Image (spheres, rainbow, N blue to C red):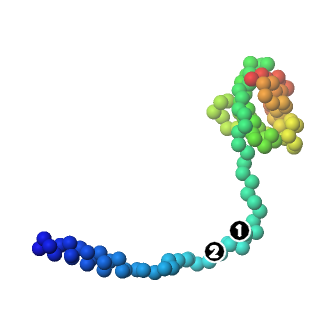
Amino acid sequence: MKYYLPLITAAALSLLSACNQNDEPEVVGGPADPMAQQLANAAPVELPPSVKESHQYRCKDNSLIFVDFMSDDKTVNLRLKRDSAPTKLVAANPGEAFTAEGYSVEGAGKEITVTLPGKDALSCKA
């Protein structure tokens, strides 16, 4: 029995090695995509801007505001509290004031001027 075990193993391996010797792999596809034409003609997708700079400012009335300047140079997110929901302000062109209904932020970097609903313009420093 000791001498037959290697022979049986070799015979089994040679039989298994002859299985499925196709040169071309079989590709199985599903149904055609019903939206293929619409997707091919769709406009390119523009990703939202990322945060370029984020500053905390102390204003003349001793209040704090938090401003995230975005990478497109036309958008900022303004928060009146650290964990509050941001208000999106947009500038028509880079370098102009960022505005939204009742809000305005002018400048960038260490000093800005901010206008909040129901308040006068405030000078703020980072």
Q: Pick the quarter of the image with the N terminus.
A: bottom left
Residue 34 seen anywhere in this rendered image of the structure: yes
For the residues labelled 1 and 2, say whether their Cβ atoms are less than 8 Å apart.
Answer: yes
Q: Would you name the residue on which mark 2 appears?
A: 33
Q: Residue at x 63, y 74 (%)?
A: 33
Identify residue type, mark 1: Leu
Quarter holding residue 117: top right
In the image: residue 40, left or right of residue 12: right
Residue 114 seen anywhere in this rendered image of the structure: no
Disc 2 is placed on an element classified as: loop
Could you tell me residue 91's position as x and y percent?
A: 84, 41
Q: Is residue 79 above or below residue 39?
A: above
Q: Pick the quarter of the image with the C terminus.
A: top right
Q: Is residue 62 or residue 9 the one in the foreground?
A: 9
Q: Residue at x 71, y 26 (%)?
A: 56
Could you tell me residue 122's position as x and y percent?
A: 82, 24
In the image: residue 50, left or right of residue 5: right
Q: Would you name the residue on which mark 1 appears?
A: 39
Query: How would you rate the neighbour count of disc 2 (Cα within 10 Å): few for under 14, some for 14-19, many for 20 or more?
Result: few
Could you tell me residue 51's position as x and y percent?
A: 71, 39
Q: Is residue 57 or residue 27 the one in the foreground?
A: 27
Disc 1 is placed on an element classified as: helix
